Image (cartoon, grey):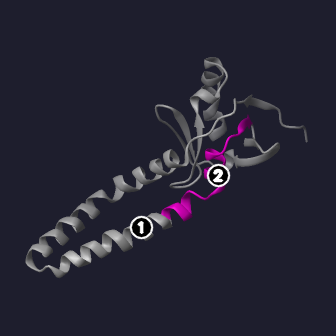
Amino acid sequence: MEPVQDLFETLPFRVTSSRYFSLIMRRVATQWISVLALLLVAMIGATCYDLRFGIVLLMFIFIVLPMVLFFFYYNYALRREAFYSVVEKVAIIDSNGIDCVYDDQRRQVLAWSDVDRVEMNREAFLIFTGRYTYFYLRYDAFATIDELEAFRKILPQFMS
C-alpha cells in the first residue's frame, strides 16, 4: 500500500467557539421556531387568564431552556470535529480525509467516508459528519485563492 500524499496544507486558523455554537443553534432554531413561538404565545395567553401560567412560563425560560442549551452544547459542541474547529491548528487535506496538526502532533479529524455533506457559507466550508456536527474550514486558511479553487473543484471527488 502506497503512502497517502498530502494535497493541501492550510495556514494556521481557528474559529471562535461562540461562532461554532451559534451556527448549530441557528440550525436548531430554524427547525423548531414555530413550535417555540406557539408555546410562547399559548403561555402568554394562559397567563392573561391565570397568573400561575406566568410562573410556569418563567420556569420554562429559566430552568428548561438552559438545560436544553446545555444538552446541545454537550452533545454536539464537544465532539472531535468541534474541538478541532475551535483550536488553533493547521489542516492537512489528503485523499483519506482531513488531519490536523495541533500541539505538534498530527491527528486524523475526519475521513471522507464519514462526511454526509458539505455546505459553503460566506466565510467557510462546513463539512458535516452528522446532523449538527461539522468541521469548520475557513476560506482564508488556504494560502492562495488558487488553492481554494482547486480544493473546491476536487471536493466532489472526495464526496463520492
Element type where label 2 sits in the image = helix
Q: Nearer the viewer, residue 50 or 1?
A: 50
Report whether 61 appears left or right of 76.
left
Q: Position of residue 51 (x, y in %)?
A: 14, 79
Kindly identify which residue carries mark 1: 66
Farthest-out residue, right: 1
Please indicate, yes or no, whether residue 38 appears anywhere in the rendered image.
yes
Start-end of magenta stretch: 72-94
Decide: is 30 above or below 137.
below
Q: Quadrant of the N terminus?
A: top right
Asked where in the image residue 101 lies, by quadrant, the reply is top right
Point 49% across, 66% down: residue: 70
Q: Position of residue 136 (x, y in %)?
A: 58, 42
Report whether 105 appears left or right of 138.
right
Farthest-out residue, left: 49
Name the amino acid type tagged 1. Pro
| Circle 2 crowding by C-alpha within 10 Å: few under 14, some 14–19, many from 20 | some
Please indicate, yes or no, whether residue 160 appears anywhere in the rendered image.
no
Figure label count:
2
Element type where label 1 sits in the image = helix
Point 78% across, 45% down: residue: 103
How far apart are the alpha carbons under marks 2 and 1?
22 Å
Q: Position of residue 80 (x, y in %)?
A: 66, 54
Q: Quadrant of the C terminus?
A: top right
Q: Position of residue 41 (x, y in %)?
A: 17, 65
51 within the magenta span: no
Kindly identify which residue carries mark 2: 83
